[in-house]
Image (cartoon, helix red, strand yellow):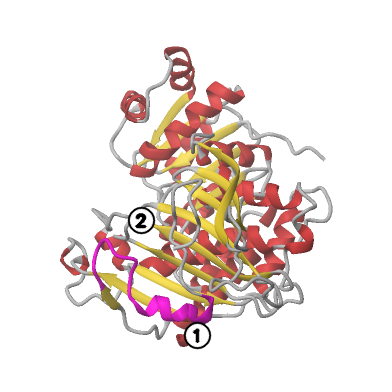
Amino acid sequence: MTEPQSDAIVFFGATGDLAKKQIFPALLGLVRDEGVDVPIVGVAKAGWGLEQLKARATESLNEHGGADPAALARLLSLLRYVDGDYNDPNTFAQLGQALAGAKRPLHYLAIPPSLFGVVVSALAKAGLAENARLVVEKPFGHDRGSAAALNRILSAHFPEEAIFRIDHYLGKEPVQNIVYTRFANAIFEPLWNRQSVRSIQITMAESFGVQDRGAFYDATGALRDVVQNHMLQVLANLMMDPPTGEDHEASRDQKAALLKAVRPLDAGSIVRGQYRGYRSVPGVKPDSGVETYVAVKLFVDSWRWSGVPIYIRAGKCLPVTAAEVLVDFQTPPRPVFAEADPAVGHMRFRLSPDVSVALGLKVKRPGEKMTGEPVELALREQAAADMPPYQRLLGDAMRGDGELFSREDIVDAQWRVVEPILANPPPVIEYEPGTWGPEAAEALLGADGPWRDPVPSGADGSR
């Protein structure tokens, strides 16, 4: 059944940094590529008027590659602006007027979570929540308890099917490519289980530090910032069972089932690191114990994946900026050829900066001896240019398609995995910028090591 499309877009926090960096380019794409032609209302308390909002939109688009004049003119003609305090009922009365009688608005809360309750309550009192959809930005709480409290606030005024918890990582083309490659090719299904998979590694590396986000990062850390959400979502896409059914919930049902089976972390399955110099960043406490690097060892307690270790690492000030998944296959049950190196086999999904899918094998070296060398067969390589994640996600939200958004039970399952370690984490270990983090992270893998560092497409996947 096709859901009715939203007939207006409201974005709270219209003068903020997220709007400038992501929302305006996404709105332009919706207008240019998908023919969106509805009122677009920005709401903020900045003492601005409509012309200043239009100027900010133009500035944003110029900084993000520019826009053809016709598309920009169409976007600017759709913009409206309401300036007011979120605690003032008059702000929402003005919003109702700006919506010009829209019956199914999409409200996007690009504001701090502490204001979610104020805004959703005011929307309901003003009659602007009925038949409306709600998009909320992460973070979805600071721990499992606060996430549950946040969900109670949202669900008091909006049904779950109308709430879209946005995680831009789910809108990325290469992340969706994992699911497509798995389920569009029957050849992989017999291999995608504990009989054939030895271990899994997921790496998200950044070569830069926290830059001007010191205060935010020092209250968050790598575990909350990217592992609890982005990396666990990648894990779910990689390991979930095939969706059954054709509605939007089919895929999310399988992701939820997988994440609920992930064994919670304990102190022996995590390594936390902090790069040298982090404590001197403005906004960071001089004695901060927040991690800028984290490596974890996880297990999925299911028949399909029982006993298969999953290693995830993410960090800043590492040698490269790249993200990839490596599925390491089992070695043959006994050697056939007298070689010092065991047989190798893996599948690699590069998520950024380029996009690739590759299969690692061992093939015979030319000559009389039965010895081999590792090679990697590139199944697909492409540049990372694609539809911006925010454009895809906002378009899906307007259509009522929640497949690429987090559901309440999925968010709870993700917090459940990291919750045991949040209250009493092991101490951070200092590491030098430009290295692959603390040496203890290598020991975490044991016999499953070493870590496979991201390499250029087409190169050998071994370290």
Give residue 206's mark: 2
Mark before the other along the chain sequence, 1 or 2:
2
Question: Which quarter of the image is occupied by the N terminus?
Answer: top right
Identify the magenta region: 431-448
Describe the element under mark 2 as helix, strand or loop. Answer: loop
Q: Is residue 306 above or below residue 8?
A: below
Magenta span includes 441: yes
Residue 132 seen in the figure? yes
Q: Is residue 445 above or below residue 192?
A: below
Q: Is residue 196 above or below residue 356?
A: below
Horizontal arrangement in the rendering, residue 17 relative to residue 128 (left or right): left
Q: Residue at x 48, y 73 (%)?
A: 143
Confirm or deny contact between disc 1 and disc 2 (CB under 8 A). no
Residue 271 position by quadrant: bottom left
Q: CA distance from mark 1 to mark 2?
A: 25 Å
The residue under label 1 is 266
Horizontal arrangement in the rendering, residue 415 relative to residue 317 (left or right): right
